Image (cartoon, rainbow, N blue to C red):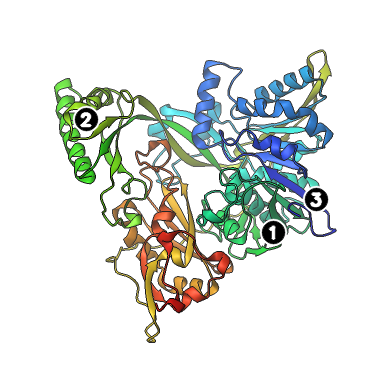
């Protein structure tokens, strides 16, 4: 039965109810009120841009600065989490965790529920930035090496990433809810496990297992069938059940979901999510540990149940990551629908004409043109770009998307007035998709490092004292006391993309077929700043051996072409039959700074799977029936079909 532990060991169940601010608002209720409620429910609200939004809200209203959606979702469930003895842990506190906690206590008072809330804070560094810099913290951009000084005056928010340690201390007060600021997605899950089992902070392999569990469920239903390559195998698409991990004291765990819910939990699904937003699998850096994912095993353990084990841990780095947001100029995005025939030709002509007019109109207005301008035909590789190796067929219609960035607002106001004029002056078949586009402020992402000893986490536990009063039942400072180690630099080389020719098949005279990569692999991609990672998972052991020998970093760099400005790096994970590729400089600056249609690279894995290769026909016979692709675009001739 889905969700039911299969051993008599002590098992703690941790469920996830959200992977980002704006995720399914019904997920928390489904976990809390489900037939098999978890012991803990975690929710992740905080992306980099979210912190800057919350900081702006708090600047306007000192009572704001947290994810109010969390209070709205949790209020009707307060009595149920008490009755079912569920502890909810969420980083919904943003830049005002105490405000979030007090809002919850007010709602609990009105509902007559005796609630205890613990708060983790101290991650907000805004008021300490200058002092930290003066004390020797450089805050250089850890991705680009740029110095901090030139952007200091444009910083909107700056938060250190805490790990599990302060949340473990918060759980010692037996709260119903823990509200945190910037705690890592993995840390809120790991804290529940450490609290339940009493794991010490330096029990590295168990800590690593908890981090892997948190990593798998932090993005919600992506662990239960969401965004899966073979999506046709997923039942109830769009209504997948949110994940639950059942963890034993030795760190082995099973990933499952609430019974009776949609979705799919299988080794291929879980492996895709294991690789999501992965860098070097042998050195996954967290505030709690450095994790080696290369030995992780993912095994079927019954319907909608997957066993995960084999992670290894080591001390974490001596610095904490800081997520800062900076004012990053201005952007504008608008679009027109263009109908065929000659859709591609019309889109190209529109782009050229718009660029000429924009430059002329900016000159007439006495302003410099935007520093960046993109014109893309959505529906014709605007998102997957060259990764997909488009055949060049002409779509019957398309969405022509115009986007620009400038450090100043003025040229974008010219853009705003110009775009609607093309509705009547462009090629035949243009249609309106809305009014004049809006100029928006861009929030840039600035990742940096700060020494651990310079940042102190704080815990405050509150409960109702009657009559609307709130009583503090505990308050303490928390510092990480365990050992740390400086991570070794990754030895990589700048790769020169070769010409795009298919890799040679085995030269033993065996029959070969030409087919898409998706015929022998599935994949998932995600963003890491301006770098995209693409995790490619072989559909069988034999397929992995062939891919490991033939799908090189040079080949993938050749496919990416100019779409990736930096290095292409490959990491093999033979235990899960996967290859993880990092493509640096592939996301147009990443986040809100990017003008790309897909600034997070979510579609690039699917584009790469469309690339055609020539490989031994015998590989197809090694793929089990339940792992064969169902997408016609990934079809390949079967060996028994005369390939």
Q: Residue furthest bottom?
A: 508
Give the quadrant of the C terminus: bottom left
Label 2: element kind? loop
N-terminal of the pair, mark 3 or mark 2, is 3
Instruction: Give the answer, above or below, for where 379 lies relative to 175.
Output: below
Measuring from the top left, give residue 310's x and y in whole percent: 67, 64
Q: Identify the residue position indicated by label 3 in the image.
A: 197
Q: Residue furthest top?
A: 467
Q: Quadrant of residue 456?
A: top right
Q: Is residue 178 left or right of residue 634?
A: right
- Observer able to see residue 486: no
Q: Quadrant of residue 327?
A: top left
Q: Which residue is drawn at the image coordinates 34% and 38% (left, top)?
A: 595
Q: Nearer the viewer, residue 128 or 101?
A: 101
Measuring from the top left, give residue 393's x and y in whole percent: 26, 53
Instruction: Give the answer, above or below, for where 539 lies relative to 287.
Output: below
The span from disc 1 to disc 2 (Cα, nearest Å) is 58 Å
């Amino acid at each position: 039965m889905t969700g039911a532990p299969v051993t008599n060991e002590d098992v703690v169940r941790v469920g996830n109810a959200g992977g980002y601010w704006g995720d399914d608002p019904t997920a928390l209720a489904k976990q809390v009120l489900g037939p098999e409620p978890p012991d803990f429910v975690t929710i992740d609200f905080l992306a980099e841009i979210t912190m800057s939004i919350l900081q702006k809200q708090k600047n306007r209203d000192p009572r704001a600065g947290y994810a109010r959606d969390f209070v709205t979702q949790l209020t009707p469930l307060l009595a149920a989490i008490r009755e079912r003895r569920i502890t909810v842990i969420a980083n919904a506190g943003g830049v005002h965790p105490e405000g979030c906690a007090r809002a919850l206590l007010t709602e609990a008072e009105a509902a007559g529920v005796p609630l205890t809330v613990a708060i983790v804070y101290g991650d907000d560094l805004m008021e300490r930035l200058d002092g930290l810099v003066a004390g020797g913290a450089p805050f250089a951009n850890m991705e680009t090496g740029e110095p901090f000084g030139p952007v200091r005056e444009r910083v909107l928010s700056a938060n250190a990433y805490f790990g599990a340690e302060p949340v473990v201390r918060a759980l010692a007060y037996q709260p119903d809810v823990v509200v945190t600021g910037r705690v890592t997605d993995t840390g809120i899950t790991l804290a529940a496990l450490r609290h339940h089992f009493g794991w010490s902070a330096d029990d590295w392999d168990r800590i690593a297992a908890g981090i892997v569990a948190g990593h798998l469920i932090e993005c919600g239903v992506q662990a239960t069938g969401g965004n899966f390559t073979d999506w046709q195998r997923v039942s109830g698409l769009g209504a997948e059940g949110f994940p639950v991990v059942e963890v034993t004291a030795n760190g082995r765990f099973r990933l499952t979901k609430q019974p009776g819910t949609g979705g799919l939990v299988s080794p291929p699904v879980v492996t895709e999510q294991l690789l999501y937003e992965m860098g070097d699998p042998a050195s996954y850096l967290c505030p709690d540990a450095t994790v080696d994912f290369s030995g992780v095993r993912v095994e079927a353990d019954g319907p909608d149940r997957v066993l995960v084990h084999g992670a290894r841990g080591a001390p974490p780095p001596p610095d904490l990551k800081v997520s800062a947001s900076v004012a990053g100029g201005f952007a504008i995005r608008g679009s027109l629908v263009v109908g065929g025939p000659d859709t591609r030709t019309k889109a190209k002509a529109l782009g050229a004409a718009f660029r000429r007019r924009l430059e002329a109109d900016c000159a007439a207005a006495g302003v410099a043109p935007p520093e960046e301008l993109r014109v893309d035909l959505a529906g014709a590789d605007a998102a997957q770009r060259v990764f997909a190796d488009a055949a060049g067929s002409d779509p019957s219609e398309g969405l022509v998307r115009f986007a620009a960035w400038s450090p100043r607002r003025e040229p974008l106001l010219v853009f705003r007035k110009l775009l609607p004029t093309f509705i009547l002056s462009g090629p035949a078949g243009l249609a309106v998709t809305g009014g004049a586009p809006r100029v928006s402020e861009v929030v840039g992402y600035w990742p940096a490092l700060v020494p651990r000893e310079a940042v102190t986490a704080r815990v405050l536990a509150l409960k109702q004292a009657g009559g609307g009063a709130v009583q503090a039942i505990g308050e303490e400072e928390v510092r990480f006391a365990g050992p740390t180690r400086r991570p070794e630099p990754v030895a990589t080389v700048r790769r020169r993309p070769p010409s795009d020719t298919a890799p040679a098949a085995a030269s033993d005279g065996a029959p070969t077929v030409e087919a898409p990569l998706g015929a022998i692999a599935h994949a998932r991609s995600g963003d890491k700043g301006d770098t995209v990672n693409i995790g490619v998972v072989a559909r069988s052991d034999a397929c992995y051996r062939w891919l490991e020998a033939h799908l090189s970093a040079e080949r993938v760099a050749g496919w990416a072409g100019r779409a990736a400005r930096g290095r292409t790096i490959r990491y093999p994970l033979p235990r899960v039959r996967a290859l993880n590729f990092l493509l640096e400089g592939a996301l147009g600056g990443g986040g809100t700074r990017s003008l790309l249609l897909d600034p997070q690279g979510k579609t690039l894995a699917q584009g790469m799977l469309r690339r055609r290769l020539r490989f031994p026909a015998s590989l197809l016979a090694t793929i089990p029936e339940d792992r064969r692709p169902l997408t016609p675009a990934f079809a390949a001739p079967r060996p028994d079909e005369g390939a």
